[in-house]
Image (cartoon, rainbow, N blue to C red):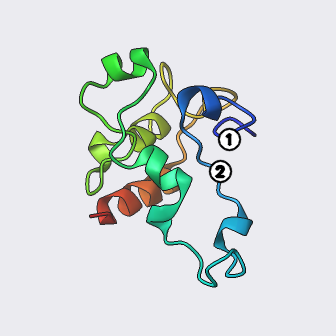
């Protein structure tokens, strides 16, 4: 599914979440793979306000990812709900409890 890639809405919303293996190959110039913080995915999501006005209004003060707080992170908020603003938006009728728990733990571990 190309939703959050340059082939989908990622270009429009500026939320590109697709990581490419080539980004992490040591032969990519410096001999060392980039840190997670050096990726476009990280810079497009961590401490970034949403670019979609309706999402910003529905979740005031939330960032795409708020380090240390999954409850204030849109990636977790939208993945953990069904109905308006759910992610993924189509063909998903149940929340992935294990996946959202892992996502919450990862967000909470960020500093």
**In the image: residue 9, left or right of residue 36:** right
Position of 35 relative to 9 (above/below): below
Q: Which of marks 2 and 1 is nearer the N terminus?
A: 1
- Check disc 2 and report its element: helix, strand or loop: loop
For the residue pair 86 and 28, the one nearer the viewer reads as: 28
User: In what quadrant of the picture does the N terminus appear?
Assistant: top right
**In the image: residue 68, left or right of residue 28:** left
In the picture of the structure, the residue carrying the numbered disc 1 is 5
Work out how far the residue at label 2 is from the one at label 1, CA to CA, in angstroms: 6 Å
In the rendering, at what x and y percent does residue 20 appear? 70, 60
Q: Which residue is drawn at 33% across and 38% down?
A: 63
Q: Residue at x 32, y 49 (%)?
A: 70
User: In what quadrant of the picture does the C terminus appear?
Assistant: bottom left
| Mark 1 closeness class: few <14, some 14–19, many ≥20 residues within 10 Å | some
In the picture of the structure, the residue carrying the numbered disc 2 is 18
For the residue pair 94 and 49, the one nearer the viewer reads as: 49
Q: Residue furthest front?
A: 29
Position of 52 relative to 21 (above/below): above
In the rendering, at what x and y percent does residue 43 appear? 45, 51
Position of 54 relative to 12 (above/below): above
Q: Do the residues labelled 2 and 1 touch (CB within 8 Å)?
A: yes
- Check disc 1 and report its element: helix, strand or loop: loop
């Amino acid at each position: 599914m190309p939703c959050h890639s340059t082939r989908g809405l990622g270009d429009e919303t500026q939320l590109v979440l697709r990581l490419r293996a080539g980004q992490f190959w040591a032969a990519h110039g410096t001999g060392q793979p980039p840190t997670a913080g050096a990726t476009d995915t990280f810079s497009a999501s961590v401490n970034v306000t949403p670019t979609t006005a309706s999402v910003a209004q529905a979740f005031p003060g939330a960032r795409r990812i708020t380090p240390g707080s999954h409850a204030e992170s849109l990636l977790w908020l939208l993945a953990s709900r069904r109905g308006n603003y759910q992610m993924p938006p189509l063909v998903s009728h149940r929340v992935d409890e294990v996946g959202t728990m892992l996502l919450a733990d990862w967000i909470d571990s960020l500093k």
